[in-house]
Image (spheres, rainbow, N blue to C red):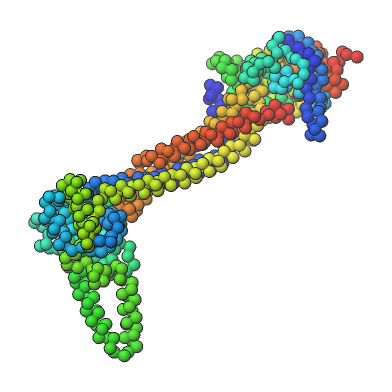
């Protein structure tokens, strides 16, 4: 999925009442299957950018299109459906729905969009097995470790065949083994043609060459001088 | 599948707030039980009033007795009859073939173990009864006859309550049920000659004797009382301290017993009755007789169905008042539940935000509150619907006896149906408030916080 941003600006009103511009006149043309890496410390605007791309918040200025669709023109309901169909989101924590078990969490997007079939369960189980979660299918998610939970979140993204995957600090609170599994899974996804945007302030993804890198602290792309 | 997951989520959140949910369910159940309880009692009384209003067309009593008093004492055995009429009136009514099918004398003054003893005749017992469950086979002819005025016929529930069986003997106490100034008629023994079959009415809670037995008991009592007066008059002349004490006691006895004993003028002695139940030939005869005996000096006449209609109107007003109060309690309970659900929403904000990010629409998320409120309300109502009748079943014997009615615990009354509707509607209105709150929540902010 191509992602295009034209002069996109997003600002928040701070506690002091002043306007805090987090994204300012950003332009981007991200081709389908790209790996986009967002750098910067906490509060620099990485998460806001991901929220804009996912359509959870709309830019106050400028225009963003996903495969030519300006999602700001869609009704909220259509935007929800668009997101459910095309965009996978992995957060740093709280990725899973506490009321559901592991398998239900993985299949949740398919169930919500009404596309869930009986064969989906076996495919979801295969993915969970690959991520080292064999036999955890019926477990309540609050019985899992932080690393296991993050792997379930990755399994959900792998299962859903999203065109775009957004990962917000996906390895920040994980042990080395889990961080490595999550990283490899995201890179594999990208290799298979999914557009992946990763926001991270640690060095897990530094060794891997991204197609585009944007530094939110410096407010510029890395190849720009 | 989608709805199943939403439902599963709702149950999960409810499970995590077990205590709040349990308190909410029990609160609704208790509020509904209260409504169910009062509704059924009022319904039973109104039903009984309506039935008996048809059964007893006209009651003649002493002048000055209110309509309600006469109906309550004669039909439901609940109030005290005031004043007496002579049996000449009874004879006259009995002779009036133009208006009357039959008439029955009623002489009420005594009780046995708080069950009213009603002096009447065999014809009345035959008319109100549905046969006997037990009968003294040695008696030839009527059980209540002048041959032996000691014989009584006991209502079905009265026999159970007082543990009376055919052949048992007992003596009555002077004074009405619940009176503090009872006088035991130990020297007049009644003998149980029959136990009436259940009729599901106030008649089940009474003991019927020959009205001449009531006269005999009180003639005797009058005689004793006169002797006592004479003794007192003699003693008055003796200048002795003990006499002064005796005089005081006598004065107190007089003051306490005056109302109950109907001293002198009010004593239910020979030739006097408390009421006459009249079966008229048709409703026009009822109206005509009502006007004749209301206008006559010394008597009053009550058209039972008219009085009962008025009683039922009072009942309806009472039912409405109880209904409004109960509905208000239910709505307060629902408000409390609404507050706990709102608090619960804050606890699950992160899950809701995640659902939104995964494509679940605001409407589906908000509907969870509606479902949760509905489940809690429905569970509370179900519990109330089950507990209410069971409680009523438990208290039925005591309530039936106290009100001389037949409460049906498993009948759903209008007040209960209204209660269910009001509760469900009010709960859904309150759920909408929660829904709006979720709808207007900035869940993105929650994602941003994450």
Q: Residue furthest right?
A: A225
- Residue at 81% across, 16% down: A26
Q: Position of residue B368 (x, y in %)?
A: 57, 29
Q: Is residue B52 left or right of residue A213?
A: left
Q: Position of residue B170 (x, y in %)?
A: 22, 64
Q: Where is residue B264 in the image (x, y as percent from the top left)?
A: 24, 72
Q: Which residue lies furthest to the front in this view?
A: B295
Q: In which quarter of the image is residue A75?
A: top right
- Residue at 29% across, 49% down: B308
Q: Is residue A73 left or right of residue B369?
A: right
Along the viewing direction, whichever of A209 and B7 lies nearer the viewer:
B7
Q: Is residue A107 above or below residue B41?
A: above
Q: In this view, does B194 lie to the left or right of B363?
A: left
- Asked if residue B82 shows in the view, the reply is yes
Q: Which residue lies furthest to the bottom in this view?
A: B239
Q: Quadrant of residue B447?
A: top right
Q: Is residue B222 above or below residue A223?
A: below
Q: Quadrant of the C terminus of chain B?
A: top right
- Asked if residue A199 shows in the view, the reply is no
Q: Is residue B207 left or right of residue B31?
A: left
Along the viewing direction, whichever of A123 and A27 lies nearer the viewer:
A27
């Amino acid at each position: 999925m191509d992602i295009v941003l034209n002069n996109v600006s997003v600002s928040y009103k701070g506690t002091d009442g002043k306007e805090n511009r987090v994204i300012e006149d950003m332009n981007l043309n991200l081709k389908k299957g790209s790996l986009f890496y967002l750098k910067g410390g906490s509060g620099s605007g990485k998460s806001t950018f991901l929220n804009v791309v996912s359509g959870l918040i709309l830019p106050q200025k400028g225009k963003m299109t996903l495969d030519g669709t300006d999602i700001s023109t869609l009704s909220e309901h259509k935007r929800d459906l668009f997101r459910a169909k095309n965009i996978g989101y992995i957060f740093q924590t709280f990725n899973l729905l506490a009321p559901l078990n592991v398998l239900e969490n993985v299949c949740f997007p398919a169930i919500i969009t009404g596309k869930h079939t009986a064969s989906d369960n076996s495919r979801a189980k295969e993915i969970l097995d690959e991520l080292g979660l064999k036999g955890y299918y019926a477990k309540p998610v609050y019985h899992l470790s932080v690393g296991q939970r993050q792997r379930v979140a990755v399994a959900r993204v792998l299962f859903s065949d999203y065109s775009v995957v957004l990962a917000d600090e996906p390895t920040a609170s994980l042990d080395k083994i889990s961080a490595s599994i999550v990283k490899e899974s995201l890179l594999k996804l990208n290799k298979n043609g999914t557009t992946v945007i990763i926001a991270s302030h640690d060095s897990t993804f530094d060794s891997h060459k991204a197609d585009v890198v944007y530094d939110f602290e410096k407010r510029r792309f890395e190849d720009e001088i | 599948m989608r709805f199943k997951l939403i439902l599963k989520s709702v149950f999960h959140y409810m499970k995590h707030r077990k205590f709040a949910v349990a308190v909410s369910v029990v609160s609704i159940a208790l509020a509904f039980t209260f409504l169910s309880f009062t509704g059924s009692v009022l319904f039973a009384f109104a039903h009984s009033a309506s039935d008996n209003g048809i059964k007893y067309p006209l009651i003649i009593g002493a002048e000055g007795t209110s309509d309600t008093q006469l109906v309550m004492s004669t039909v439901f055995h609940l109030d005290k009859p005031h004043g007496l009429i002579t049996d000449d009136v009874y004879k006259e009514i009995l002779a009036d073939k133009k208006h009357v099918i039959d008439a029955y004398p009623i002489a009420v003054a005594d009780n046995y173990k708080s069950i009213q003893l009603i002096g009447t005749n065999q014809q009345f017992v035959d008319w109100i009864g549905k046969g006997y469950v037990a009968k003294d086979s040695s008696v030839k002819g009527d059980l209540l006859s002048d041959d032996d005025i000691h014989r009584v016929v006991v209502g079905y529930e009265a026999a159970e309550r007082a543990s009376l069986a055919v052949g048992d003997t007992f003596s009555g106490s002077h004074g009405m049920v619940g009176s503090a100034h009872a006088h035991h008629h130990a020297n007049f023994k009644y003998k149980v000659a029959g136990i009436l079959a259940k009729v599901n009415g106030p008649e089940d809670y009474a003991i019927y004797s020959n009205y001449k037995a009531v006269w005999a008991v009180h003639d005797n009592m009058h005689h004793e009382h006169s002797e006592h007066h004479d003794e007192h008059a003699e003693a008055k002349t003796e200048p002795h301290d003990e006499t002064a004490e005796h005089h005081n006691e006598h004065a107190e006895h007089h003051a306490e017993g005056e109302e109950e004993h109907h001293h002198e003028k009010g004593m239910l002695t020979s030739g006097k009755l408390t009421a006459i139940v009249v079966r008229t030939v048709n409703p026009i005869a009822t109206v005509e007789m009502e006007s004749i005996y209301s206008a006559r000096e010394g008597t009053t006449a009550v058209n039972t169905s008219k009085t009962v209609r008025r009683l039922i109107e009072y009942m309806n007003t009472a039912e409405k008042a109880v209904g409004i109060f109960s509905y208000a309690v239910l709505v307060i309970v629902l408000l409390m539940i609404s507050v706990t659900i709102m608090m619960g929403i804050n606890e699950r904000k992160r899950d809701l935000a995640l659902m939104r990010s995964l494509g679940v629409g605001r409407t589906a998320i908000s509907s969870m509150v509606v479902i949760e409120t509905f489940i809690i309300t429905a569970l509370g109502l179900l519990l109330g619907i089950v507990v209410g009748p069971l409680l009523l079943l438990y208290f039925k014997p005591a309530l039936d006896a106290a009100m001389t009615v037949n409460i049906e615990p498993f009948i759903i009354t209008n007040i209960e149906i209204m209660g269910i509707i009001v509760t469900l509607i009010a709960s859904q209105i309150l759920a909408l408030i929660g829904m709006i709150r979720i709808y207007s929540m900035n869940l993105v902010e929650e994602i941003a916080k994450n």
